[in-house]
Structures are given as C-alpha cells and as structure tokens.
C-alpha cells in the first residue's frame, strides 16, 4: 500500500499509447442509442431509457468498462457516481487521498490514463519506511534490495532472498489452471501460520513481511490464506512493482474517464434496485436517491461493477445462482479508515532526513500508514493516515466518538514523535464502513471454483469490480476488461 516516492518526482510523459483493446472484438455493431441528461433527469419517462450495455457502478471498474465499450463503438449508461478513488481538497489549497493511494504499475488503468493524457507521478519502490519495536527503519535508499540490506543483517538477508525467490516461483504457479493440489492446500492455512512454520525467515524479517503487506489487504495476515499472501507478495518481490499517482490527486483520473465517456452517460444519484433478465434484454429499475423517483432502463447486457456485497441491495430476476450467492456470502473484506491531519509546516522535521521526506511510513500503530498530502509551499502540511485492520474497524464504528479517535491518534503520534501533538491543527475523518476492500478468509480464495462462478456471466449479466479478481484497483480494471471482452465476443 505504501511506497516511498522519490523526492525529485518524475512526471510521467502522457504520450498516446496503443491500447490493449486489440484483443477486444470490434467487429460487432449494433446501433448505439443516445441518451441525454435532460431526458434522464426528467420526470418518470413513459418509455424505458436504452443503451447497449448498462453499467451499475461508476467507480474505476465501471468507468473503465464504459471506456473500453465506447472505444469499441458501444453506448453505455452508468447510474450513480462516486467510488473509492476520491481526493479531498481543503480551503487552504491542500489535498489528500480519501481512498486509493497509488495505482500499481501493472494496473491496466495506467494505459487508459496515458491515452487520456492524465499526468502521472512515478514512484520507484513498493517497500516503505517502517517502525519495528519502536525503532524507525527509514527508506532513504534507491531500491528495495538496498533498503532490505539496511534492515536485515547478511545472514538474515541470504535467507530472505532464498525465500523471496521461492515466493516468485509460487506466484508463477498461480497463473496455471487448474491449480495443483499443493497450491490449493495453501488456501487452508493462514499466511501468518505458513510464514511462521515454513519460511525460515528471522523474526525481524517476518515482521517486515507482515508490516509491509497488511495495509494492502487491510486485515490481519492471520485472516488471509497463504495462497492470497503469495498473490500479495508479488507486489514486493525482487525489486517490487512501482506505483503511480495522479498529479493533483487521483480523482482527476476518474474525472478524465467520466469526461471521455460523456457526463450525460453517467446519471447521478441513481441506485439500481432491480435487475430483470429476459432472453434478449436486461431491464433495470433505479431509484433516485434525492426524490425516490424510479426509472426504467433497457440494455442488451449489463455489467455490475460494485462491491459484491452491494449486490445484496439489488433484487435479481431470475435470482442469483446459489453458487454465486455462496461466493458472495463467504467472501471477507478488509477495513480502511482515513484521517487527514493538518499540521504546522515546522513539524516536517519529524518525517524528513537530510531535507528529504521519508514518508510514507508504516507505523504498526493506530496511525496506520502515514502519507504526505499535497500542500502549498510555505503553508501548513497535510498528512494522510491510512488506517487498516482492527483499528479501522474500531474507528469506523458509528459508536466511535470522534474526540476519542482524535485522542487515540494524538497519543500514538506523541509516542512515536514526542511533542508532535502541539503541531496538529485539524483532523478530518473518512469512514469506509463496513467493507473497504476485497479479501478472502482462510479456506476461501479468489483462485477457487466459487470465485470462478462470479467471473462467469449469469445470462446477460456480468460481474466486475475489484471483488472478483484482486484486492486492489488492479482487480477493478482487470474485471472490466474481462467483462467487456466477453460481451464483445458474444455479441
Ligand atoms: C482507503 C482506501 C485505500 C485504497 N488504496 C488503494 C491503493 O493504494 N491501490 C489500489 O490499487 N487500490 C487501493 N484501494 C482499492 C481501490 O480503491 C479499489 O479497488 C477500487 O477503487 C475499486 O473500484 P470499483 O470500481 O471496483 O469499486 P468502487 O470504486 O467502489 O465503485 C463502485 C460504485 O458503485 C456504486 N454502487 C454501489 N451499489 C450501487 C447500486 N445498487 N446502484 C448504483 N450504483 C451502485 C458505488 O456508489 C460506487 O460509486 C483502496 C481502497 C480504499 C477504500
């Protein structure tokens, strides 16, 4: 989740690149029906509104699906907007992420952003500075291996490197279908138990693995299987994958996507409540969250691009298959809570070394991962705390008193950086309740048959979103490509 960014940020050139749409079958054509915003926002229409494909969910997954479909000449309509790519902007000119922090370099969305000329910043490492037993290990080096060599002694490092190479081999096996019996067995043991009993890593190296990866799946490493741990470790293995951020805030990327798709294709405040499939179309009922007026949409196909548990808000006819229902019910989720902390600029000495920022820092305390927000030169600094796991669950509870949350965070800050609380001017809290990110409990994984059932369509309805393929926004993008490809091949 957290990665250290170069102090000399490199703004990635936003040249036009060839999209991976070549795989998508463009040969099928049926008439794209236009839908105007005025029509959409009018009083209950007598005729249903129509499009080729209706997309439920205007997060990264739904917007990406719509992007690919538009490139292939299809019309789409997306009721609702929002999603987990969100940037908060404050009156003093500072801004920080509320949701997604970085796009990993292997995320297909990066190709879309290049195509849309969205400026990106490049980071170079997946590991971050971290606290272990009260001691800070600052990431001041240029690469993961150099950083690791500053944390582990040479014996620990040799064992770590052998283990890491084995992890890379196991990751390759995850791409094979069907998975071997040995691999599937790793679904039954927790990542923590497996590392502790088989890795041979030193206690410090084990803690490094835990502290660096837990913010990724946003729950304890005891709650995910070794199989999912192997998939997560891929982001850190070897030199690690490099993440990207959008200059000026990640929300600019989804805004660029929405502009490309056409704002009139995205209908605000429309919650999908019913999805009815017949042999030759899909009928959707939406409810306007402002005035509770209902609208009817017809489309040839439908893609749901919402968190899977949100499918429980929708009534399907015919109902979702028992296997899909079981897949949704047995899925787990990680929790996130975000706090933006405005602090006096002078306090930056706490997180700089030799004039360079060592943020993000993984704290292993209720502060979670401390990121740096965007600020105006000379003004206050904005820190972004990405809290995950049990601390996030506690803070997310509506019974949680904001004054207590604030005090817990200030106490944790003071323990780590004595005197820091004097510099804090304001805190803003953002809750993701109850489920922020996909995760699978021990005994379940995204590599089993149950999950596979969600990657197959039910009639004319396709299921996308980050809960079907991966824990990260990579899953949101990959699932959009899968659904669009399947629709274009079928039509
Ligand atoms: C705090 C936080 C930090 C994160 N950090 C990272 C990170 O650094 N890197 C990374 O890769 N990923 C990160 N993630 C995960 C990433 O944000 C998600 O994987 C990704 O944004 C999911 O996109 P999506 O389109 O699948 O879902 P969403 O963005 O959740 O979009 C779903 C949309 O569907 C709408 N919707 C739901 N139900 C209905 C309905 N019935 N009718 C109509 N609309 C509906 C919702 O309102 C929402 O707008 C983070 C997530 C959080 C919460």
Image: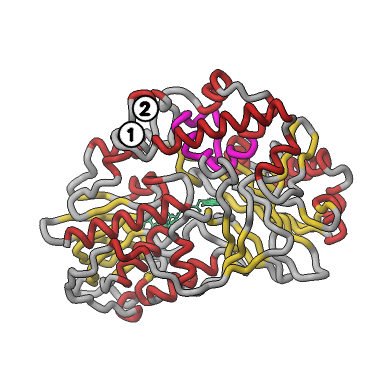
- Label 1 CA crowd tier, 10 Å (few <14, some 14–19, many 20+): some
Q: Answer yes or no: do the residues labelled 2 and 1 have beta carbons within 8 Å?
A: yes
Q: CA distance from mark 2 to mark 1?
A: 8 Å
- Of mark 2 and mark 1, the one earlier in the sequence is 2
Callout in the foreground (2, 1): 2
Above or below, 219 against 25 in this view is above
Residue 184's disc number: 2
Badge 2 element: helix
The image position of residue 426, as x and y in percent, is 76, 57
Provide the residue designation for mark 1.
448
The answer to whether 41 appears left or right of 351 in the picture is: left
In this picture, which residue range is highlighted in magenta? 210-233
Residue at disc 2, CB closer than 8 Å to ligand 1: no
Q: How is the image coloured?
A: secondary structure
Q: Is residue 269 covered in magenta?
A: no
The image position of residue 489, as x and y in percent, is 20, 59
Q: Which residue is painted at 77% across and 55% down in the image?
A: 357
Residue 142 in view: yes
Q: Which residue is painted at 21% across and 48% down in the image?
A: 458
């Amino acid at each position: 989740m957290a990665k250290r960014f170069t102090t000399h940020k490199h703004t990635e050139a936003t040249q036009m690149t060839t999209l991976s749409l070549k795989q998508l079958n463009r040969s099928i054509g049926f008439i794209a029906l236009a839908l105007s915003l005025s029509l959409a926002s009018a009083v209950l229409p007598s005729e249903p509104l129509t499009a080729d494909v209706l997309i439920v969910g205007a997060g990264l997954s739904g917007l990406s699906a719509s992007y690919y479909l538009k490139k292939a000449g299809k019309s789409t309509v997306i009721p609702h907007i929002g999603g987990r790519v969100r940037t908060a902007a404050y009156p003093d000119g500072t801004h920080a992420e509320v949701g997604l922090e970085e796009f990993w370099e292997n995320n297909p969305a990066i190709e879309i952003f290049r195509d849309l000329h969205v400026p990106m910043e490049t980071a170079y490492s997946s590991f971050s500075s971290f606290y272990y037993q009260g001691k800070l290990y600052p990431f001041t080096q240029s690469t993961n291996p150099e950083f690791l060599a500053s944390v582990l002694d040479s014996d620990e490092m040799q064992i770590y490197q052998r283990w890491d190479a084995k992890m890379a081999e196991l990751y390759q096996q995850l791409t094979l279908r069907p998975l071997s019996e040995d691999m599937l067995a790793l679904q039954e043991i927790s990542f923590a138990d497996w590392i502790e009993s088989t890795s041979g890593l030193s206690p410090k190296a084990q803690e490094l693995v835990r502290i660096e990866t837990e913010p990724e799946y946003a729950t304890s490493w005891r709650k995910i299987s070794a199989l999912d741990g192997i998939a997560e470790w891929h982001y850190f293995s070897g030199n690690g994958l490099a993440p990207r951020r959008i200059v000026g805030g990640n929300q600019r990327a989804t805004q660029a996507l929405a502009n490309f798709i056409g704002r009139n294709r995205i209908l605000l405040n429309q919650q999908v409540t019913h999805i009815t499939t017949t042999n030759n179309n899909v009928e959707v009922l939406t409810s306007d969250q402002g005035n509770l007026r209902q609208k009817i949409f017809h489309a040839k196909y439908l893609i749901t691009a919402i968190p899977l548990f949100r499918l429980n808000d929708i009534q399907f006819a015919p109902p979702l298959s028992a296997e899909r229902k079981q897949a949704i019910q047995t899925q787990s989720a990680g929790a996130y809570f975000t706090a933006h902390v405005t602090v006096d600029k002078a306090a930056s000495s706490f997180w700089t070394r030799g004039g360079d920022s060592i943020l993000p820092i993984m704290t292993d305390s209720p502060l979670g991962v401390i990121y740096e927000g965007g600020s105006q030169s000379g003004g206050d600094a904005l820190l972004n705390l990405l809290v995950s796991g049990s601390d996030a669950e506690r803070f997310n509870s509506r019974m949680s008193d904001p004054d207590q949350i604030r005090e817990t965070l200030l106490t944790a800050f003071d323990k780590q950086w004595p005197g820091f609380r004097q510099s804090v001017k304001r805190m803003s809290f953002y809750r993701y309740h109850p489920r922020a990110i996909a995760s699978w409990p021990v005994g379940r994984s995204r590599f089993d048959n149950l999950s596979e059932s969600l990657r197959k369509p039910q009639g004319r309805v396709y299921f996308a979103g980050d809960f079907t393929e991966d824990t990260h926004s990579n899953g949101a993008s990959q699932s959009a490509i899968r659904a669009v490809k399947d629709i274009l091949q079928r039509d």
